[in-house]
Amino acid sequence: MVFSKPSIISIIFIAFKAMEDKTVRYCSLFPIILMICFCFLKSTTSEVYNVGDEEGWNSEVDYVSWSRKYNFSVDDVLEFKYNKGQHDAFEVTEATYRSCNTSSGVLAKYETGDDQVKLTKSKKYWFVCNISGHCLGGMRFGIDVKAGNTSTNLGPTPSAKSGSTYAFERWSLSLFLFASGILLNVFC
């Protein structure tokens, strides 16, 4: 069964309709007001992206294609999973990305094998593997991170592991609060 998202107008109408009823008690107004507040809540979730999806960070993945599948926003997280010692992940400048020469232009080094990189600014980020030959072999990518959660992704993001269910949870909570308001109205 598919439920459509209730409009704010219908929620306000229900609230005012409840206020017209002489039997309404103050305890039933609280859930209605709370539900209206949740309707105005802006979704500020972040996504966690496993670099390379199921393959992880290794020399057998086309990372340019991988990075084009997603729309990255500020506060998203890139998760680099690899065998420590066999790979690493360096955040670099564009010039270093293009040349694969990490003698300069390295902004950050990640070498644990399970690295989390939070995208804190709206800018272009560039990543390479610094193990000899890996960058030139394709272990590099660049992403353009946009401000806020303004994703215009046309397809699903199969490896994103977080906020995709946030909207469903928020509306489930709203439905719960609405039902609680009705029950309180009946029993108070």
Image: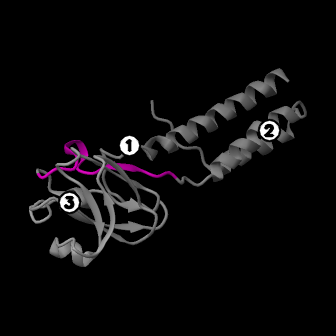
| Most distant residue in the right direction | 22
Kind of residue sitting beneath label 1: Lys
Amino acid identity at mark 2 = Phe
Q: Residue at x 26, y 57 (%)?
A: 89
**Closer-to-camera residue (10/91):** 91
Locate residue 128: give its quadrant.
Answer: bottom left
How dense is the environment of label 1, judged by Cα within 10 Å: few (below 14), some, or many (20 and up)? some
Which mark sits nearer the N-terminus, 3 or 2?
A: 2
Residue 19 location, quadrant: top right
Q: Residue 188: image x %, image y %?
A: 85, 24
Tell me residue 8's x, y (percent): 65, 50
In the image, residue 100 above or below residue 63: below
* Tag shown at residue 30: 2
**Which span is picked out in magenta?**
45-59
Q: Is residue 94 left or right of residue 163?
A: left
177, above or below 109, in the image? above
Q: Which residue is mark 3?
A: 129
Taking the spot 86% from the left edge, 40% from the top edge, the residue there is 20
In the rendered image, residue 22, in percent from the top left (x then y), is placed at 90, 34
Q: How is the image coloured?
A: one colour
Residue at 21% x, 44% y is 83
- How far is disc 2 from disc 1 in space, using C-alphas? 34 Å
> Where residue 161 is drawn, which disc sits there?
1
Quick one: label 3, few (<14), some, or many (20+) residues within 10 Å?
A: many
The kind of residue tagged 3 is Cys
Task: Give the Cα distance between marks 3 and 2.
Answer: 54 Å
Element type at mark 2: helix
